[in-house]
Image (cartoon, grey):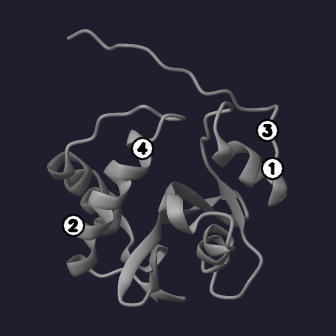
Amino acid sequence: MQIECCTEEHIEICASLLSQVYAEPEYGENWKDTDACSYLKRFYKIEPTGCFVAIKNKEIIGAIFSYSYPWQAETLIYIQELFVSVKYRNMGIAKSLLNSLGNGKTVRAWLVANDNTSASGFYKKMGFKKNSSYKLNSGQINT
């Protein structure tokens, strides 16, 4: 398995994988590949250097999409998506993708993860903690 920089040519395959991963019972989401492709392209365009794919036997088996921004006296990395094919989980692939961020330096990262998924457990295992200062708020905007 190798980690490579994501390219525009990888996006459609990544979108299909994202759709498959999020269709799994723990998420139960229904992504159309075209919507997933538009979604990933949007984040790829923000910062292509924050996007990586895991490849095994010429097949994309996982990906991470992130972007960075200045925050006070440091740079934060926001992880938008990290996903790995179900058949390749628990093999260190997500950890390798996560470690591809920061160009070998220790960096601070933020993300949103559903508490009721294996992803939440993975992030806890990797040392991520809930931030008591910030809370995710959601709602509708009526125009």
- Of the image marks 3 and 4, the number of the one nearer the N terminus: 4
State the residue lying farthest toward the front: 87
* Kind of residue sitting beneath label 1: Lys
Q: Earlier in the sequence, mark 2 or mark 4?
A: 2
Camera-side mark, 3 or 1: 1
Q: Amino acid at mark 4?
A: Tyr
Q: Residues at badges 2 and 4 in contact (C-beta under 8 Å)? A: no
Whole-percent x and y of residue 67?
A: 48, 64
User: Between marks 1 and 4, how big is the CA–CA gap?
Assistant: 20 Å
In the image: residue 43, left or right of residue 110: left
Residue topped by disc 2: 12
Q: Amino acid at mark 2?
A: Glu
Q: Quadrant of the C terminus?
A: top left
Task: Check the image and name the residue furthest to the top.
Answer: 142
Q: Which residue is mark 4?
A: 22
Q: Crowdedness of circle 4 by 10 Å Cα count: few (<14), some, many (20+)?
A: some
| Image point (81%, 49%), residue name | 124
Residue that label 1 marks: 124
In the picture, the disc for residue 98 is: none
The type of residue carrying mark 3 is Lys
Dividing the picture into quadrants, the one containing residue 53 is bottom left
Of the image marks 3 and 2, the number of the one nearer the N terminus: 2
Quarter of the picture holding the N terminus: bottom right
- Tell me the crowding category of disc 3: few under 14, some 14 to 19, or many 20 or more residues within 10 angstroms, Cα based: few
Tell me the mark number nearer the camera, choosing from 3 and 4: 4
Mark 3: secondary structure: loop
Please identify, in this view, whether the residue under mark 3 or under mark 2 is nearer the observer. 2
Closer to the observer: label 2 or label 4? 4
